[in-house]
Structures are given as structure tokens and as C-alpha cells.
Image (cartoon, helix red, strand yellow):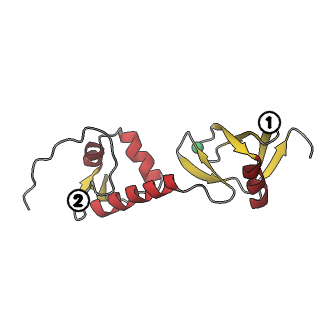
Amino acid sequence: MLSRPERKPSRINHSPKKARQNWVYEFAEVVDLYQVHPNTVRNWIKQGLPHIRNGKKRLFRGEDLNTFHSRGRERRKFSCRPGELFCVRCKQRHSLVGRRVSFHWTSPVAGLLDWECPDCRRRNVTHMTHAGYDRLTKAGVNLSSDIDD
Ligand SMILES: [Zn+2]
């Protein structure tokens, strides 16, 4: 199969159709294809991008890359499941069910959730409405607020 020379995209747009479905890409080729830092691809792997190990090499099927990026779009569209929060540090959702998290009311209707990411161990401060607070509590997250209600 002949490959037409392709123009580099002018902006980073992880289109779910970017990779060729029946192609197999090496790590460096994935970096090149999406014009991202190698660490970004390592993060995708952590986030569940399927890959094949071939000795020391990691290979990626175009089909998997496209599926992963189309799911990424969906992931961004939909909010977290009950009890889950999005870590802005490692860009992943984590369940906080059964964990103890401190909550500081900043107004009668909203506050700040101060939590440590169970995965990357970094601190997140998430703004949350009363409704969000209730949803987390119902999901089983142990919220300790600074006022008694
Ligand atoms: Zn994290």
C-alpha cells in the first residue's frame, strides 16, 4: 500500500480517526502522529491504551489508538460516576468511595473538597455544590465538613 505524504496538523486535535485502522505503530510513531510528548503517550498507556509488547518494543494498533481517542472524547463529555472525582494532576477519574475527604464550605450552597489523589498522591482542590456534596455522601465517600449540620 502506498502512503501519501500527509501534512502535519496545524493544531493538536486527537481525532479518533487519526491513526490508520490496520496499521501498527511503534511508540515513537505514536508520539509523532499525535505531536505529543512521550510522557503523554505513557499516560495514555496508564489510562488503558492497549498495546502489544514485542520484546522491548511497545506496539500500538491503529484501531486501538482510534478507539482510545474516541473514548477519551466521551470521557470528557460525561461527568464522573457517583463517588468519582477527576484528578487534574494525572487526568484520571478515581473513586473516593470509602475514603475520608475534607470539605470546606465557602458559601451556604458550595464549598471546596480537599482530597489526595489515590493514584498520583497529589492534592486536588475541587469546587463542589451542595448537590455534588450530597451525591458524594450518598455514594459512600466519607466527607468531613468543617461545620456540623
Ligand atoms: Zn492523580
Looking at the rendering, which quadrant does residue 121 occupy? Answer: top right
Q: Quadrant of residue 78?
A: bottom right
- Residue 22, position as x, y percentages in the image: 22, 65
Residue identifier under label 2: 20
The residue closer to the viewer here, 119 or 72, is 72
Callout 2: 10 Å neighbours few (<14), some, many (20+)?
A: some
**Image position, residue 148 (x, y; %):** 92, 43
Tag shown at residue 107 = 1
Q: Is mark 1 within 8 Å of ligand 1?
A: no
Q: Secondary structure at mark 2?
A: loop
For this rendering, which residue is in front, 99 or 15? Answer: 15
Place of residue 80 in the rendered image (x, y in percent of width and height, measured from the top left): 60, 55
Is 137 positioned to the left or the right of 77 in the image?
right
Which callout, 1 or 2, points to the residue nearer the camera?
1
Front-most of residues 136 and 50: 136
How far apart, in angstroms, are the residues tagged by discs 1 and 2?
51 Å
Q: In the image shown, does 35 or 112 lie closer to the viewer?
A: 112
On the rendering, which quadrant does ligand 1 occupy?
Answer: top right
What residue do we see at 68% from left, 40% from top?
Answer: 127
Three-letter amino acid code at disc 2? Arg
Tell me the amino acid under the disc marked 1.
Ser
Numbered marks: total: 2
